[in-house]
Image (cartoon, rainbow, N blue to C red):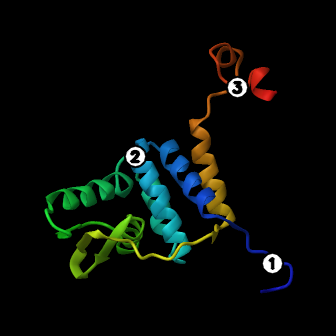
Amino acid sequence: MAAGVWIVTRSVNEVMTLAAKAARGAGAPPAQAAQFGAAAAVHLGAGREIDPLEQALAALPEGPVILLPLALMRIAEQGQGGHISGTVTDADPALLQSYLEALPYAARLADGGLVELYLSRPSARPRLTRIALPDHLFDDWNRLAARLLVPESEASRLSGAGAGLSDND
């Protein structure tokens, strides 16, 4: 490491939550935003390029943040045994791999977008505790997440936003 250069790491939970809030702020429904958060944490924890994450958020309210969870759900719903396969097309392979690794059960990406799900086998992914999150990505995600906040105004306070006296006790 060069002198004076610090690599800031954040907890996996912080990265996952911030990514989910950024997806919500960019227009994703709550369920897909949560899945994006989990996939983003896996993606960054694996040291993959950040471009697919940035492109996925930029595509909202359409694109992979919406389509990948739905495609994986359709494949899983077709199976009646422990092993199911189906094809996912038009997805960035690295991002798709991250979504698969974020699943609670084992999954594999084969050639040509063939996805194999092993519903009766738990995921064997390593459990991360810290993730290096580039400052510009942290700032971008915070900016998107801030869209969820209620604007500060007297009207918003009168309708219940913000902390009251009892909330600070």
Determine which quarter of the picture holds residue 117.
bottom left
Q: Secondary structure at mark 2?
A: helix
The residue depicted at 62 percent of the width and 47 percent of the height is: 143
> For mark 3, what is the residue?
162
Query: How far apart in space, not on screen, are marks 2 and 1 (Cα)?
Result: 37 Å
User: Could you tell me the amino acid type at mark 2?
Assistant: Ala
> For mark 2, what is the residue?
31
Give the mark nearer the N terminus: 2 vs 1.
Answer: 1
Q: Position of residue 34 (x, y in %)?
A: 46, 51
**How dense is the environment of label 1, judged by Cα within 10 Å: few (below 14), some, or many (20 and up)?**
few
Q: Where does the N terminus fall, quadrant-wise?
A: bottom right
Q: Position of residue 30 (x, y in %)?
A: 43, 43
User: Could you tell me the amino acid type at mark 1?
Assistant: Val
Q: Where does the C terminus fall, quadrant-wise?
A: top right
Residue occupying the far right of the picture: 4
Q: Position of residue 146 (x, y in %)?
A: 62, 41
* Residue 136 seen by the camera: yes
Q: Position of residue 50 (x, y in %)?
A: 52, 69
Q: Report the front residue among 60 and 149.
A: 149
Query: How far apart in space, not on screen, are marks 3 and 1 (Cα)?
Result: 38 Å
Above or below, 73 relative to 124: above
157 displayed left or right of 68 = right
Above or below, 65 relative to 82: above
Q: Secondary structure at mark 1?
A: loop
User: Could you tell me the amino acid type at mark 3?
Assistant: Gly
Disc marking residue 5: 1
Give the mark nearer the N terminus: 3 vs 2.
Answer: 2
Q: Secondary structure at mark 3?
A: loop
Between circles 3 and 1, the one closer to the viewer is 3
